[in-house]
Amino acid sequence: MNGTPDAVVVGAGPNGLAAALRLAAAGLRVRVVERGEQAGGGLRTEEVTLPGYRHDICSTVHPMAATAPFFREFDLSSRGVRLLQPEINFAHPLDGGRAALSFSDLDRTADGLGRDADSYRRLFGPLLRSADEIVDFFLTSAFRRVPLRGAPAITRFGLQGLPNIRFLAERYFTDDAAKALVTGAAAHGMLDLTRPLTAALGMFLGMLSHHQGWPLVEGGSQAVADAMVTALEQQGGELVTGHEVTDLREFDGVPAVLLNTSPGAFVAMAGNRLPDGYRRWVRRYKHGPGVFKIDWALSEPVPWANPDVRRAGTVHLAGTMEETIAGESAPAHGRISEAPYVLAVQPTVVDPSRAPAGGHVFWAYVHVPHGSTVDMTEAIEDQVERFAPGFRDTVLARYTMHAGEMQHWNPNDVGGDISNGEASLRQMLARPVPRWNTYSTPIRGTYLAGAATPPGPAVHGACGDNAAQVALREVFGIRRAPRLTPAP
């Protein structure tokens, strides 16, 4: 690209690329600048254990990408990206060879929960009937109206989701299987599960299992980022890799600059151009627990005691609801759990292309105190062995990253916090600072576009898309967001 672009996006993760694509759809000259040697951010896929074993370094299961408004419009399938649906979206093993299973089919899931079957239908049935309206309300692009017909369902969801997950589970369910199933989903939020709003996450992710599923990307999550980069370049946009931005003055003269970064990184890049009040608010922005992650190359599938778990894409390992809550309480309060909640994914259940013939890839992470460098390998593998005796005998190689190494790999994962900021009630209402428009900043033409803005973490593209629409309106006078360019 010759000359000064109309807009620069810093950070080539899913939000940065979503922002760039919306800006390019308006006919603007867009440049994306990425610190790493390849685009993707949390979507990167690499061979970190053995040759031929392809591991997603961060995000690997994509219920949001399957249903979010941005990706519905972008249409991954038309761009050669296949989302693969496991037969069982997620499983929650229990001692004694039992397991609670979440299928795409609501009734099939409920029927496996014994005397809690009708209660499960009563909780998730109304949510599923209004799933499109609920998703669009929470993940819609900025300034796009939500149909009024969705208001009752959205209100009901908000009221049900405001308490903590224990309150919700004990209100609806009697047995440990159903309680564990919804609690394991809620634990994705990396919060102390006794806090408000954790019920909402358990409901939302459980609903998505029955709506568009919890799919994985054929060949690895990198395929999503690659498709977005290709689409950008087809529209004349440019990706510059291997360049770390340390000073926003580098972009003086560029009308719009969008930052898919952490709030702290923005403050560092802005130097003395920010007022003290804004700096104080950013200092108050709280990052949550970090993660310790293991990628394994396996000689055979994980030998789960319950054979149904061998068909699940995602597996939550903690035992009962009470054990899950205890496992998540420790890192939220700065402690290491001896029996942590383990979030595991087995991609080769649906995608044998991830490994050589006969081989398998498997990964898991646990939540740890912010910035922890403690090695959690033994604790994680103990939990896997608890529900899959003989698992260690299948391990060919392993690759680990503690929370500090996660931040080195992706600077947005401050202290290993892959959510780019705690997803608490306060921080979801004012993310990252209490401003009427949280994407805009005190620097004219500069916008925040990462997961530290609404609607928060996950691969949905909404944060970047929202920020781009604000920039189009405020900088370029384009009030109606242009439609994304269809695949050629």
Image (spheres, rainbow, N blue to C red):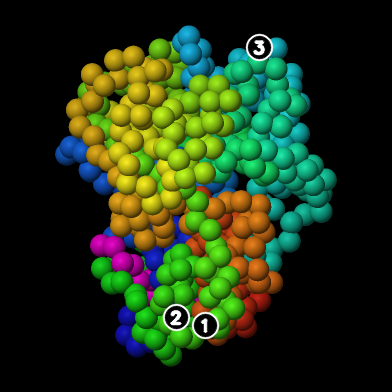
Point out the stretch of residues depicted in magenta: 27-37
Camera sees residue 306: yes
Q: Which residue position is annotated with label 2? A: 270
Task: Give the Cα distance between marks 1 and 2.
Answer: 7 Å
| Position of residue 205 measured from the top left corner of the image (x, y, whole percent) | 59, 38
| Position of residue 228 measured from the top left corner of the image (x, y, whole percent) | 41, 59
Magenta segment includes 251: no
From this viewpoint, which residue is outermost toward the top? 96
Q: Which mark is residue 150?
A: none
User: Sequence-wise, which precedes: disc 3 or disc 2?
Assistant: 3
| Position of residue 55 measured from the top left corner of the image (x, y, whole percent) | 30, 41
User: Sequence-wise, which precedes: disc 1 or disc 3?
Assistant: 3
Which secondary structure lies at badge 1? loop
Label 3 or label 2, whichever lies nearer to me, is 2
Which secondary structure lies at badge 2? helix
Q: Which mark is residue 274?
A: 1
The type of residue carrying mark 1 is Leu
The type of residue carrying mark 3 is Gly
Q: Which residue position is annotated with label 3? A: 114
Quadrant in which the C terminus is drawn: bottom left
